[in-house]
Image: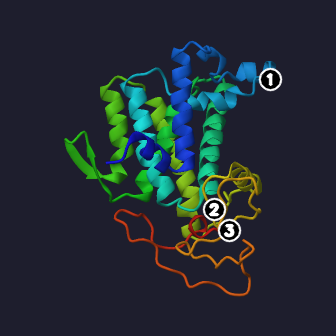
Amino acid sequence: MSTPAEYYRSLPPVSKFYGVACLMTTSAYYLQLYNPDNIELDYGLVLKRFQVWRLITNFFFLGQFSFLFAFRLLMIARYGVSLERGPFDKRTADYVWMFVIGALSLLGVTCSSVMAAVPYLWSPFMGGSLVFMLVYVWSREFPNAQISVYGLVSLKGFYLPYVMLAVDLLLGNPLKPGILGMVVGHLYYFLTVLHPLAGGKFILKTPLWVHKLVAFWGKGTQMNTPVQRDPSAGVAFQGRSYRLNGTRPSTTGQAETGSHAQAQQPNQADGVAFRGRSHRLNGR
């Protein structure tokens, strides 16, 4: 059995960063290092006083220490990590881009609601919705995976988000954050997997600045990265992945253009949603 330190070191970088950031944000609140009113989403203060940090900081506050906070953190540790180690293996930049798309979509939905003078969808903190987006994407990537809810009910992964909504309802928690997260998660999954597999255009390609950010960060790997790794970064980018149908990297770290490696079949893990090819899964 691994120690807590070994478990922490084994976590993939993006999920670890987001989970630790959420934990530190709530811990700092209990140490009275800041007032939550200073980090909540307030479009009036963003537009009038240029407090643009509120567009980011509101996603890192999952609430006070409680069962709900622990539950949300556990969802990041389990389903966020499972996504990063599974469908997003060797695709750190794509995983970061998924977080960015989710955050921008949530901001767009709430901003439209506020501008329409019907602020029903607005919420001061949208970290819970972002976590629900992760759970929804996981449920679509692993629809046949068997999961157990508190050791009482066993069901397929596809139904996990709806079970989480039912749990929130039984605990008296608001359903709006979970529903918003599921809507955004479905939008992302449709545009990156379902629509391209149906022959549609892939419109959510990870932009260059995200690849540069990940390269500068020096954590994780990304196949077909269009930027050179930062010499000062701790982890080198290894080029294309054999599992994801890439090409063999040359000795200089750049992909060879003259030959292509033989495509290998993806891991036949239980519950993987699609076996076909899509833009999101082959890096094009």
- Name the one closer to the observer, 242 or 230: 230
- At a point 66% along the width and 32% down the height, the residue shown is 56
Above or below — where is 36 with respect to 246?
above
- At a point 47% along the width and 40% down the height, the residue shown is 132
Q: Which residue is mark 2?
A: 222
Mark 1 or mark 2, whichever is nearer to me: 2
Q: Horizontal and vertical percent for residue 119? A: 60, 23
Q: Horizontal and vertical percent for residue 186? A: 51, 50
Check the picture and name the quadrant holding the C terminus: bottom right
Q: Determine crowd level at label 2: few under 14, some 14-19, many 20+ residues with C-alpha closer than 10 A.
A: many
Q: Determine crowd level at label 3: few under 14, some 14-19, many 20+ residues with C-alpha closer than 10 A.
A: many
Q: Which residue is mark 3?
A: 224
Q: Mark 3 or 1 closer to N-term?
A: 1
Look at the numbered disc 2 and give the secondary structure of its residue: loop
Question: Can see residue 214?
Answer: yes
Q: Which residue is mark 1?
A: 50
Residue at the left extreme, as displayed? 152
- Name the one closer to the observer, 278 or 96: 96
Q: Horizontal and vertical percent for residue 19? A: 51, 37
Above or below — where is 23 with respect to 104?
above
Tell whether 165 sits left or right of 113.
Answer: left
- At a point 35% along the width and 22% down the height, the residue shown is 172
Q: CA distance from mark 3 to mark 1?
A: 37 Å
Look at the numbered disc 1 and give the secondary structure of its residue: loop
Tell whether 196 sits left or right of 276.
Answer: right
Look at the numbered disc 3 and give the secondary structure of its residue: loop
